[in-house]
Image (cartoon, helix red, strand yellow):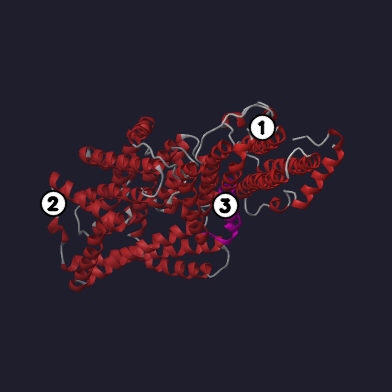
Amino acid sequence: MLGRILLPSIFLVLAYGFWVSSSFKDIAAGVALFLFGMLCMEQGFKAYSGGTLQRVLTVSTNRLWKSLSFGVISTTLMQSSSLVSVITISFLSAQLIGLAEGIGIILGANLGTTTGAWLVAGFGLKVNLSAYAMPMLVFGVVFLMQSSKKTKGLGWILVGIGFLFLGIHYMKEGFSAYSQHIDLTQYAMTGVAGLLVFTLIGVVATVVMQSSHATLTLIITALAASQITYENALALAIGANVGTTITAILGSLSANISGKRLAAAHLIFNGVTGLLALVFIRQLLQAVDKISAWVGIAADDHTLKLAVFHTLFNLLGVVVMLPLINRLVSLLQRVLREDKVERDQPRYLSEASLALPDVALEAVLKETRHLFSNAFTVIAHGISLRRATVTGDEDLQFLIEAPVKFIDVNLDDQYVRNIKDIYSANIEFLSRAQAEAPREYAEGYNALRRANLDVVAAIKAVKHLRKNLLPNITSHNSHIRREYNRFRVRIGKVLRALASLRDSDDAVVTLLSLDQVRVEMADAEHNSARVIDKLIREGSISSQVATSLINDGAYVNDVVQRLLNMTEELYRAAIPHDDPVHAELSLQADEIQEIALEVIQDSGAEGPDRS
């Protein structure tokens, strides 16, 4: 409802401003160019923020001071605390970093955003930026026309800087023209009322423009043209600082509970910082005067003094909140809890991740592992095996002769509760991510899609197998009972092997281990066929039962192959797309069958009853 009212209201205000004042057009155009420049810069930095950013985050956030430094440096380079906030939320949603590290980055981003005020006040207002903007745009467009992703990224950055410079130029020119006809300082307010009203205006302006950098630039250029008072400019800067949290909040709406906690931490930090600035504004102003005199800033240079104030109150917020981070984490985890739902939901997917191909790939990789973890239990219960039995140390061979303990489970209900929503979300996320990602990520996304399909296909095969499995594992015919229990053992062994490989970080070793499992399962499949032939010849089972064993054996083989294929696809997706081992690691199907036959021939003396 608010969105329906807000956008038309903005259009009406702009239309009225364009009609009554040509100077307003310059200011509005300047703001638009500035915002467009920031969007271009964000687009450019995304070209460098995939795997590189993930590797940097891994080594740059394992200590609080590193997280803080990362926030400062990344925001200084990107000149967008909003982009850093959204990227941090996406990494947190994918559990690539922890909540405390994420909060550290947000604190650093607030310090990093103060560099924008220094650049505009110290450089932008004293130099004709339009002269620099044109070459930036020309070179930027030349780079944009190249095929290389990194070169295009550099092009977007240069174009973005060019539009930023043009935006500052037009804002400055617009306010200078305004000062010749209208004195906006007649609307100035002093005292507490002025602080509160202009702080609120700063919040609203930043919410509308979705950029505290744009708001601060507008404030500084208006202050330089003497269109607002120094005191009101300070209040506007405080409001801009609080208003910038709206971007993180919007970015967290589609994130998981971790992303929502980080957005809440961002709001708390900026809110506390703004409150401290308002309460201690007189003391801060005294400190600004002393620091300005010490570094040589003139007493009447209010634009640079605003930059000092902006840095000072953000630094105050960091000093106050830094020792409280662990308590803040505990509070957020206690207050913002995951909803208890009857149907398991995705944990790692978020809208913010889609903008970063490497993060999106990592998020859906984790979500597919989550899906398999749920499927592991469903499959085990489907063949009447406890998860603890599968993952334990007990020899599964004892199941062939041991009395069966039924696990009464409704596979359809378990599928709906634990599989369906996650599987659907993964497929939708993969479709959206693949549409936006560069071509080199296609194989990774395709591998994950196949992995998801394999998980569901394995469950469906177990469902078909279960129809004959349950009555036959209690059959009075010991031969029938033994063969169906061998089916259970074969699937149980694969699940156990996959569970043992789950914590392996070495994708290459895992893929080689999977080949060994494939050979063992092919051996078991050939042996099962030999046993069935022998039982038919000896008259131990009827032809109808033999047919059922053959058909159900096919379901077992399908479950086994689907599980192994799924695991292989998961680990292939985890290997960097340009790694040559992709084409070299796993054995081909004919190679596996050849090795399995050799194993059978070499061990034929052991008899046909091996499992």
The quarter of the rendered structure image containing the N terminus is bottom left
Q: From the viewer's perspective, is the residue at label 3 or at label 2 nearer?
A: 3
SS class, disc 2 = loop
Reply above or below: 397 against 515. Answer: above
**Location of mark 2 (residue):** 189
Identify the amino acid type marked 2.
Met
Q: CA distance from mark 3 to mark 2?
A: 64 Å
**Location of mark 1 (residue):** 476
x, y percentage for residue 71? 43, 44
User: Circle 1: is it few (<14), some (14-19), or many (20+) Cα within 10 Å?
Assistant: few
User: Circle 2: is it few (<14), some (14-19), or many (20+) Cα within 10 Å?
Assistant: some
Which residue shows up at 32% across the image and 65% down it? 32
Q: Earlier in the sequence, mark 2 or mark 1?
A: 2
- Which segment is the magenta one? 437-458
Q: Main secondary structure of the magenta part?
A: helix
Reply above or below: 114 against 482. Answer: below
x, y percentage for residue 207? 28, 54
For residue 119, side relative to residue 5 (left or right): right
Identify the amino acid type marked 3.
Leu
Q: Quadrant of residue 440?
A: bottom right
User: Circle 3: is it few (<14), some (14-19), or many (20+) Cα within 10 Å?
Assistant: some
Q: CA distance from mark 2 to mark 1?
A: 94 Å
